[in-house]
Amino acid sequence: MFYALQLASFAILWIMIVYAFNSLLARRYKKPKLKRTVTYVFAVATIGVFGEIFLDAAYNHFVGNPLWEYRILPVHGGYTSSFALVTWGIYGFHLSLLHDTLRRHHIYSFYKLALIMSVEALFAEALLTLSAKLFLGEFLYYYFPGDLWHISSFQNIPFYFICALVVITTVRRFKVDPAFFACMCASFVTVLIFIV
């Protein structure tokens, strides 16, 4: 029970950090738009969790060892975590807040957005796992390559770029019927994380 409260507090802390960062970036308090936030949270959580399992399993198959291993609530051989739903969802929340800021700076290009997201994700995951070590006493995940001190890896950049392209495309399609797609994503991820 105490560990669940720690995880919930950690998630709330990161939601506040993400909100403060985006408000600072926009130079005003951001007002989350419910429909957009739900769309981004569910799309990014789904793509992130499925993408982690696919990428790390493929990497393990071709290289002979996984790229990373989750240390907090690992599932599927450590390729992902039950808590990854929350962390990827928080990143989706960040992207939903960042949406207007990027548009205000005339950043619309599909590939430019993907590049920004992929580089930003590298820093975000490093900060996330370092803060998990401080707050929860354990790294959220551990990268086997030591190029970034085992808290991330430059080898992730191509994955994050492809993931960003998928997220951008998915979010654009989500706008057609966000309630349907959100329920569908929640169902897929629930089965993947808690049943399979």
Image (spheres, grey):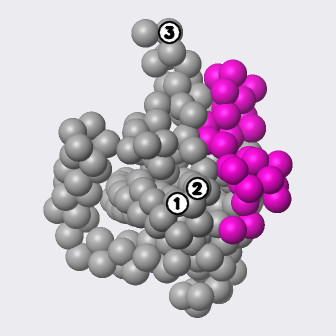
Q: Residue furthest top?
A: 2
Q: Amino acid at mark 3?
A: Phe
**What residue is at 17 percent from the left and 62 percent from the top?**
180
Reading the image, the residue beneath label 1 is 60
CA gap between label 2 and label 3 equals 33 Å
Residue 145 magenta-drawn?
Answer: yes
Reading the image, the residue beneath label 2 is 65
Q: Amino acid at mark 2?
A: Asn
**What residue is at 21 percent from the left and 39 percent from the top?**
195
Residue 73 place in picture, x, y as percent: 47, 31
Which label's residue is closer to the chain start, 3 or 1? 3
Q: Quadrant of the C terminus?
A: top left
The mark closer to the camera, 2 or 3, is: 2
Provide the residue span drawn in magenta: 128-155
**Residue 51 in sight:** no
**Residue 2 in sight:** yes
Q: Residues within 10 Å of mark 2 (few under 14, many from 20)?
A: few
